[in-house]
Amino acid sequence: MRYKEIVFSVILGCFLSTAAHAQIIEIGANAGAAGYIGDLNPKDLFKPSGVAFGVFVKDNLDPYWAIGIHYNYGHVEANDANSDDASLRARNLNFSTSLNELSVQVDFNFLEYFAGGGTKKFTPYMFAGVGGVLFNPKARYDGVEYELRYYQTEGKKYKNYAVSIPYGVGMKYRIGERLAVFTQLGYRTAKTDYLDDVGDKYPLVSALGKNGFNLSDPSGQNFPPGSQRGNYVKNDTYFFVHVGLSYTFTSDKCYKF
């Protein structure tokens, strides 16, 4: 079974299970910034490059545990021309892509908290899960934008979707009986090396764009075929830093303390 079918099945199953026994449902929205770590940004673990926003619905199972379905959008980009590394500037690659992510995530609150009530008004928390992300790397040279996946710049095909593994930490604070604010930082390991269209070596036959422009090697330095184009890390990473607001709907069956 392909990755997207597996992810869809997991998410659908979790949603149906949640809906079947839900007592305390929390909905929310968030906004912030997105960033990426990969072949065009190999070292800076916190370098936002675009906007991000998202929505979610959670089932608060008890004051410590919650499971939710999350949709997040982000935009990330990087450009060798802006790098502090002279070798990357000489390579002269750039990319940008939108990220559309759907995931199932589990929250663990460190304190006895939930937005519908509880003994604590705030708590730090951590989360982890599994999901899928859609992406489509593009590059701009001489005023022309190219959808890089269709040019096979490294002589190979890759899919525009991948499994993603979200994980991170945050802080929640209850500002009313049912209303809460939160902030969080979450990283995603994407099971692909091609969020940025770069992952392996220069191809034997270069990919040519408009007017014969060499998309595989835009540096003009004619790096030899088979030499390393990307780094040796096989999975790209992206992250979202969010602030948000949530509202909780409670049923007649509430938690008892």
Image (tube, helix red, strand yellow):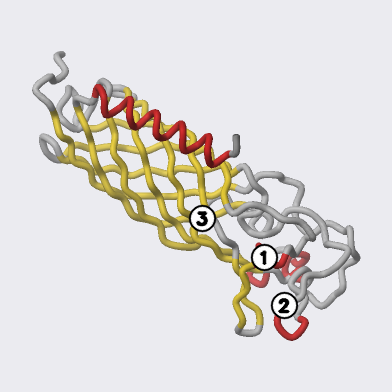
Q: Which residue is mark 2?
A: 209
Task: Please tell me whether mark 1 sits on a helix, a strand or a loop.
Answer: helix
Residue at image point 46% right, 53% down: 100
Q: Residues within 10 Å of mark 1 (few under 14, many from 20)?
A: some
Residue at image point 39% right, 34% down: 12
Residue at image point 13% right, 20% down: 254
Classify 250 as above or below 246.
above
Q: Quadrant of the C terminus?
A: top left
Left or right of 251 in this view: 73: right
Amino acid type indicated by mark 2: Gly
Question: x, y (%) of residue 234?
Answer: 71, 44
Question: x, y (%) of residue 174?
Answer: 18, 37
Q: Say which mark, if any, is on residue 35.
A: 3
Q: Say which mark, if any, is on residue 86.
A: none
Mark-to-mark CA distance, 3 and 1 = 24 Å
Left or right of 208 in this view: 167: left
Q: Quadrant of residue 151?
A: bottom right
Q: Residues within 10 Å of mark 3 (few under 14, many from 20)?
A: many
Nearest-to-viewer mark from 3 and 1: 1
Task: Please tell me whether mark 2 sits on a helix, a strand or a loop.
Answer: loop
Amino acid type indicated by mark 1: Tyr
Number of marks? 3
Q: Which residue is mark 1?
A: 150
Amino acid type indicated by mark 3: Gly
Residue at image point 61% right, 55% down: 195
